[in-house]
């Protein structure tokens, strides 16, 4: 892996990377996030007792939409025809938190790390939005790439 930033041209100007000559390949990325909150808010989210409705269901759909719309939010991302987006939200009673995992796949010419990170982030943000009436001090994070496969840079797995 070179130390060169791919979104800068020879003159140091920002540009969108040309992936036209690349061959499509199977690519996958998994990103995670976490949202911690008060016990009261956690129980309300878990039991679906919020005035706004089912926070976890809405958050899961929001995460899928975020993955699909990443190119509209992140200026230099390519629009991709994703083949799979899977959002997992696991409650942790001991810490009054939800662990979020976003898996994204594509057969394409560029990776899906940004799509997975967007999905995990927006899932957490949506839970916050749904529960903020009960707890404005919720904490989101860390949000991070756990693994990616495919493409020229090869595989990555967080240790």
Image: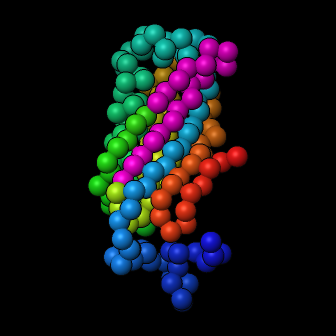
Q: Is residue 37 left or right of residue 58?
A: right
Q: Is residue 35 above or below residue 9?
A: above
Residue at 62% from the left image edge and 14% from the top image edge: 93
Residue nearest the observer in this picture, 123 or 92: 92
The quarter of the displayed image where residue 27 is located = bottom left
Q: Quadrant of the N terminus?
A: bottom right
The quarter of the displayed image where residue 94 is located = top right
Residue 132 percent location from the top left of the image: 50, 25
Residue at 46% from the left image edge and 10% from the top image edge: 47
Query: Does residue 145 belong to the magenta stretch?
Result: no
Residue at 47% from the left image edge and 39% from the top image edge: 102
- Residue extending farthest to the bottom is 11
- Residue extending farthest to the right is 159
Q: Is residue 91 left or right of residue 115?
A: right
Let me know if residue 102 appears in the view: yes
Highlighted range, magenta: 88-106
Query: Does residue 91 belong to the magenta stretch?
Result: yes
Q: Is residue 148 above or below residue 45?
A: below
Let me know if residue 71 appears in the view: no
Residue nearest the observer in this picture, 34 or 21: 21
- Residue extending farthest to the left is 81
């Amino acid at each position: 892996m070179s130390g060169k930033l791919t979104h800068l041209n020879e003159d140091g100007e920002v540009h969108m990377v040309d992936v036209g000559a690349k061959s499509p390949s199977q690519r996958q990325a998994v990103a995670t996030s976490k949202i911690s909150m008060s016990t009261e808010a956690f129980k309300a989210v878990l039991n679906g007792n919020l005035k706004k409705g089912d926070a976890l269901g809405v958050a899961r759909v929001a995460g899928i939409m975020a993955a699909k719309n990443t190119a509209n939010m992140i200026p230099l991302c390519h629009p991709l025809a994703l083949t799979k987006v899977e959002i997992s939200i696991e409650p942790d009673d001991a810490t009054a938190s939800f662990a979020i995992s976003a898996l994204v796949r594509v057969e394409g010419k560029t990776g899906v790390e940004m799509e997975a990170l967007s999905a995990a982030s927006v899932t957490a943000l949506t839970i916050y939005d749904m529960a903020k009436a009960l707890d404005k001090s919720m904490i989101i994070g860390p949000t991070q790439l756990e693994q990616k496969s495919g493409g020229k840079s090869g595989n990555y797995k967080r240790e």
